[in-house]
Amino acid sequence: MQKVAHWLLVIGGLNWLLVGILKEDLFALLGMDMAGWLPRLVYILVGLSALVSLKPKSSAPMAPQM
């Protein structure tokens, strides 16, 4: 799940780079508009990925203190 979230955040970041440089988002460059379901779904998934990435990563469970 973390890998998927990471790649969705990369896609979202590149989209914002396009907005900053070209004043167009990736979907507009592909001929889509925000009224379609696909751009909205991708934006929602990118936002959820940002929330998932806020969760701290732990590689091992904590050992009980003695």
Image (cartoon, rainbow, N blue to C red):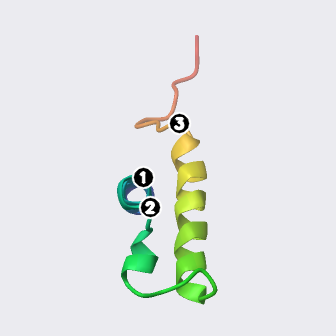
In front here: 39 or 4? 39
Please determine whether, in this image, residue 54 is positioned above or below residue 38: above
Q: In which quarter of the image is the N terminus?
A: bottom left
* Residue in the picture at 60% in, 50% down: 51
The amino acid at mark 2 is Lys
Q: Are marks 1 and 2 in contact (CB under 8 Å)?
A: yes
Binning the other alpha carbons within 10 Å of mark 1 as few (below 14), some (14 to 19) or many (20 upward) gives few
In the image, residue 54 lies at what x, y percent?
56, 41
- Identify the residue position indicated by label 1 in the image: 20
In front here: 20 or 58? 20
In front here: 29 or 14? 29
In the image, residue 42 lies at what x, y percent?
52, 73
| CA gap, disc 2 and disc 3 | 34 Å
* Residue in the picture at 44% in, 61% down: 23
Please determine whether, in this image, residue 2 is positioned above or below residue 40: above
Q: Is mark 1 on a helix, strand or loop?
A: helix
Q: Which of marks 2 and 3 is nearer the N terminus?
A: 2
The amino acid at mark 3 is Pro
- Identify the residue position indicated by label 3 in the image: 56
| CA gap, disc 1 and disc 3 | 30 Å
- Identify the residue position indicated by label 2 in the image: 23
Please determine whether, in this image, residue 58 is positioned above or below residue 38: above
In the image, residue 13 lies at what x, y percent?
41, 53
Please determine whether, in this image, residue 19 is positioned above or below residue 66: below
The amino acid at mark 1 is Gly
Residue 28 as seen in the image, left or right of residue 49: left
In the image, residue 47 lies at what x, y percent?
59, 59
Residue 10 as seen in the image, left or right of residue 56: left
In front here: 1 or 66? 1
| CA gap, disc 1 and disc 2 | 6 Å
Q: Is mark 2 on a helix, strand or loop?
A: loop
Q: Is mark 3 on a helix, strand or loop?
A: loop
